[in-house]
Amino acid sequence: MIDFLKTAGGKETTPHPGGNVSIVPAKPPDLETAKKPFRKYTQKIADMKKKATALVIKDETTDKEATEMLAQIATIQKAMKLKKKGVSERSDIAPALKVVAGVKALVLSFSKPLDIITKSLKSRKGTYSYQVELKRRADVKKAQDAQTKLQAKLDKQAEKEEVKPVTMPAMVVPKKPEPVRTETGSSSTRYQWTYEITDWSKVKREHLEAIGKAAEKMAPDEKNHPVLNKVFKPMVDAGIRKVAGVRIYEKPIVSVRGA
């Protein structure tokens, strides 16, 4: 029987019908070899960073370009994650902790710039999408106001002429934008009301007291924001839009799906 522990340290001779056979130990895992499948991402990430920095999202075309880049990044990150998992699970590499750690460090060095690019693109894309949405809402309100004004005029005329009033047909409301789709994925934007403390000196005493009471009921290792959420989030959810010392605003949240 072959002792694989001994084999790992050198050659071992075992009986064989045709004579003694030398078993050569497997080549130890090599970090550079393990890193090789990831090298192709270096230039891709550099190109993406350059392109993303120069991109100004101002219309449907550039919005689609941003979606294309975000989808590509999502696909790359997914591929790197699978490759990293493959290295960790390979029987010939897994025992070499230094190799696995080296690969993980390399993937992390790639992931960080990709995360920065993603955050920047999502922020700019969210700002553009919100501007489009605000214009859509303004157009809806303008059309509704015009229809209400015209309906009032028709009702007044009908009353004057003592005839049955004419009801205006339902207004055609501008549709909300569909998800942006490209060959490599898609993106969509939703809007969520949230808040931030802008001036503690202006926060009402009753709100400060509520924060204090909420803090007493929470574990000491919890962060501050859950305490604030217990006080201000219910206000925001209830539709309150003005609170002293607090900015309440709509935040665009961009979601991306890669291929």
Image (cartoon, rainbow, N blue to C red):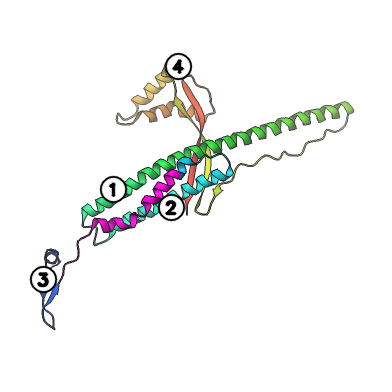
Q: Are marks 1 and 2 in contact (CB under 8 Å)?
A: no
Residue named by callout 4: 202
The x and y percentages for residue 247 are 48, 24
The x and y percentages for residue 197 are 43, 24
Per the rendering, the mark at residue 12 is 3
In the image, what residue occupies the spot 58% across and 44% down?
A: 60
Report the amino acid beneath label 1. Ala
Q: In this orientation, which residue lies closer to the viewer: 221 or 253?
A: 253
The question of residue 31 being in magenta is answered with yes
| Image side of residue 67 versus residue 164, left or right | left
Per the rendering, the mark at residue 140 is none
Give the Cα separation between the discs numbered 4 and 1.
46 Å
> Above or below — where is 180 with respect to 154?
below
Q: Nearer the viewer, mark 2 or mark 4?
A: 2
Between discs 4 and 1, the one toward the N terminus: 1
Q: Nearer the viewer, mark 3 or mark 4?
A: 3
Between discs 1 and 2, the one toward the N terminus: 2
Between discs 3 and 2, the one toward the N terminus: 3
Q: Secondary structure at mark 1?
A: helix
Residue named by callout 2: 75
Give the Cα separation between the discs numbered 2 and 4.
46 Å
Between discs 1 and 3, the one toward the N terminus: 3
In the image, what residue occupies the spot 41% across and 52% down?
A: 76
| Image side of residue 193 versus residue 146, left or right | left
Q: Are marks 2 and 4 in contact (CB under 8 Å)?
A: no
Q: Residues within 10 Å of mark 2 (few under 14, many from 20)?
A: some
Please state the extent of the stretch shown in magenta in the rendering.
24-50
Q: Are marks 4 and 1 in contact (CB under 8 Å)?
A: no
| Magenta stretch, overall SS | helix
Report the amino acid beneath label 4. Lys
Residue named by callout 1: 105
